Amino acid sequence: MAGTFVIAQGGGPTAVINQTVVGATLEVRKRHPGAKVLGSLHGVRGIRDGNYVDLSAIPEDRLRLIAGTPSAALGSTRDKPDAAYCEVILKGLKKAGADAFIYIGGNDTSGTQQILTDAAGGSIAFVHAPKTIDNDLEENDHTPGFISAAEFVAGAFLSVDLDFRALPGIYVGIVMGRHAGFLTAAAAAWQLDPDSGPHLVYVPERPFSAAGFIDDVRATLDRHKRCIVAVSEGVSTADGKALVESLVPPDKLERDAHGNVKLSGSDLPSALERALAEGLSGKRARVDALGYMPRGYVGAISAVDAREAFDAGAFAVAVAGEGGGSVALQYDGTKTVLKKVPLKNVAGKTRHMPDDFMKPDVNQLSEAGMAYLKRLVPEKYKVGKPFV
C-alpha cells in the first residue's frame, strides 16, 4: 500500500506512547519493505512546519530502546486544529508524499483525524492510535498509558496509607482526570483490606460538596483514626463549576491557551488544606497534587501496558491498509483484543467511568469497580499488615 507513513504524537506524554511509535515503525518495515516512515516533531506542528525525523533510517536496537523510554520521543503538542488548521496539515502531508498518517493520542487527536479524513476524500489513510492515562476513549475497555499510570497511583496510595497508620492524620491526594474518574479510582486498586486507604474516592462523575466532604472526612476519622482521600482534579459542584473555581480566588486561577482552567496548575491543594483546617480544626492534614508524575514515571512502566501500546502501533499499520479508522483495545471476556472502529465513534467523545463502579451511598469503589481495576492493575507488591 503506502510508500510513506507519517507518525505523530499528541497531547500529554505517557510511559508507553513511544511503544506505539516503534510498533508502527517496525510493522511498516515488515509489511512494506522500503517504505519511508517520517516522525513528525511536536505533533501536527511538525507537519505544518515540515519538521520530521526519518524513522526509517534508525536502527532497530535504538528504536526498541526509545520504545521503553517514557514521555513522547517525537515531542507533542496541545494544538487542537480546526478545519482551517487541518487544511494546512493536509497540505503538509501531501508535500511530504504521505500515503498514511498515524496520529497517537486521545479525544482531540481522534477529532483531528476525523476532520482530516473528511477533507482528504480518501487520498490519504488517517489512523488514530489510542493513548491517554485518563482512560476516557469510547469503544475502548482501557487505553495505552492507563495501566502504568494506574500502577503509580495505586502504589502511591498504598504507601501513604502505610505512612499514616504510623502517624495518623488526614491525607488528600489530587489525581489527574478532567472528565473521567478511572485514574483516581485506581488509588483503591491495592487496598490491603477494608480498613485501608483510600477511605474516600471523589470522581468527576459525581457532584462534589465541600460540606459533604468535610462530613465524610470527620466520619472516617472517627472510624479509622486516619483518613486517606483520593480526589480527581476534575470534580465539580452540583452547579457544574469545577471545584478549583469554587475554592481558589479568580486571580489565582491559571488558564490554558483555550481559556480552560488548569486544574493541576491552580492552587487547589492549598485551598483544600484551608477548607480542612476550617472544618476540622486541630487535625493534621496534608494535601498533595500528584500532578504529572503518574503519566510517565520511569519506575512504573507496566509490561502489559507496554506490550499493548506496541501492538496498537503495529495494528494501526494494518488499519491504514484498510483505509483508516481508529484502533481500539477491547475485552472479549478473557483477554484484550485489538479492533478497528470508525473514527466517528471516538472523535470528540468522552467515555465516563460507569456509575456502578462506585457504591451508591458512599464515596468508595463498588465490587464492579474493584473487579475492573484488579483485572488491569493486579497486586504487584506483597506487604505485611502493620500492627497499628
Image (cartoon, grey):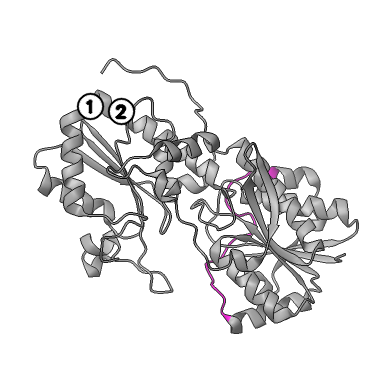
Q: Looking at this view, name the residue that lies furthest to the top.
A: 387
Quick one: 306 or 50, which is closer to the camera?
306
- Mark 2 falls on what kind of element? helix
Tag on residue 231? none
In the rendered image, residue 109, in percent from the top left (x then y), is placed at: 59, 66
Quadrant of the rendering where the C terminus is positioned: top left
Residue bearing the label numbered 1: 167
Instruction: State yes or no: discs 2 and 1 in contact (Cβ < 8 Å).
Output: yes
**In magenta stretch: residue 74:** yes
Q: Amino acid at mark 1?
A: Leu
The answer to whether residue 369 is left or right of residue 377 is: left
Which residues are the magenta region? 65-82
Q: CA distance from mark 2 to mark 1?
A: 7 Å
The answer to whether residue 104 is left or right of residue 154 is: right
Residue density around tag 2, few if under 14, some if 14–19, many if 20 or more, within 10 Å: few
Observer able to see residue 384: yes
**In the image, is residue 377 above or below residue 1?**
above
Residue bearing the label numbered 2: 163
